[in-house]
Amino acid sequence: MTGQVTYHVRRAILPASAGLAAVAILTAIALLLVNTRGAQAAQAPVGLGTAANFSVLAGSTVTNTGPSFLAQDLGVSPGSSATGFPPGLVGGTIHLADAVALQAKNDLTTAYNDAAGRTPFTNLPAELGGSTLIHGVYRIGAAQLTGQLTLDSQGDPAAVFIFQIDSTLVTAANSSVVFINGASPCNVYWQVGSSATIGTNTAFMGNILAATSITMNTGATLQGRALAQTGAVTLDTNTIIEPLCLQPTGTPTGTPTGTPTGTPTGTPTGTPTGTPTGTPTGTPTGPPTGTPTGGPTVRPTRTHLPITGPGGGSTLVPMLTAAGTGMVVVGGLLVFLYRRRIHES
């Protein structure tokens, strides 16, 4: 009997223990996923302020060799020297130790501190070549790029990439940074604790925010900005163009569902007070254009000629009357004589 009780108790304890172990494992996995994904949390872009108007911004000086081209402004502050232009060309304006350059340098400092303080972050080894990274914040002691670094925005054109580099950034010759799935160069930030060196013929992308200086070797290109706080920016036959921000390609699919609910509450209160004062002034000027188509239906009546002459009479009428009477008498006499002759014969 005792053995049976012990057996049943053990059977009850074992499932309970297994359930607790499963819960503990699932909790650990969940925490691991949270920590891993937290480093890739969506980040807002780093605000560059007026520094966004500059292709090159330096603290001490800018020197150029060869036909470099800067699409935006060039600025130096507190230094006042920029040499090599021409043969270098600046698409914007050159600001040397003026108020515009000073404001841009202040905005650069703010942006640098913002990028350096972003969390959470993911630690990376020094060598970036051969890697594919999604959006997020990455921390590196001293960064080296040999070959190709791929940045994948995973279909989000607003994806932000921030690289927090404690000391230097150096790229080997012919290296490159490329984008896939809609990443935008304008949302890539390289916060460099000391100096950055972009190797010969390297195709680099993003905004370089260096605490000290930036050197671009012969033929290197940058789709972004070279912004150095305290030191110099050195160029040699380079092209720096403004980074473009890609926009979403979809279009809104929803339609407004609300309808106006208010109705006008006011009514007109005035009435017309004037009356027409004019009258028609024209008269018909045309005669009837039709002609009668029927004939008279009543027998015409005889009309007497008007009597004219003094006293309202005429001498012609009595004369005619007398002549007619004489003729009647003569005719009657001739008829009488003709009948008498016949009677006698």
Image (tube, rainbow, N blue to C red):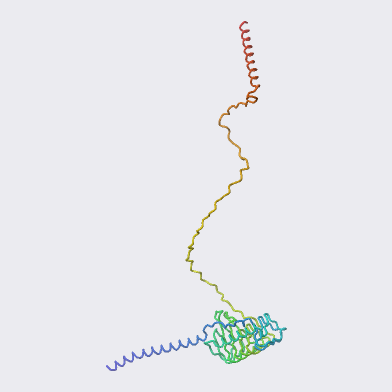
For the view shown, which residue lies furthest in the right direction?
A: 87
Image spot of residue 318 (x, y percent): 64, 20
Question: Image quadrant of residue 144?
Answer: bottom right
For the view shown, which residue lies furthest in the left direction?
A: 1
* Residue in the image at 39% along x and 89% along y: 20
Question: Image quadrant of residue 220?
Answer: bottom right
Question: Image quadrant of residue 218?
Answer: bottom right
For the view shown, which residue lies furthest in the front direction?
A: 311
Image spot of residue 257 (x, y percent): 48, 69
Image spot of residue 4 (x, y percent): 29, 92
The N terminus - image quarter: bottom left
Give the number of callouts: 0
Q: Is residue 205 above or below residue 260?
A: below
The C terminus - image quarter: top right
For the view shown, which residue lies furthest in the top direction?
A: 344
Image spot of residue 250 (x, y percent): 55, 74
- From where the camera sits, is residue 90 visible? yes
Is 7 in front, or is 91? 91
Q: Is residue 222 above or below residue 5?
A: above
- From where the camera sits, is residue 185 visible? no
Is 132 in front, or is 189? 189
* Residue in the image at 57% along x and 32% along y: 296
Is 285 in front, or is 207? 285
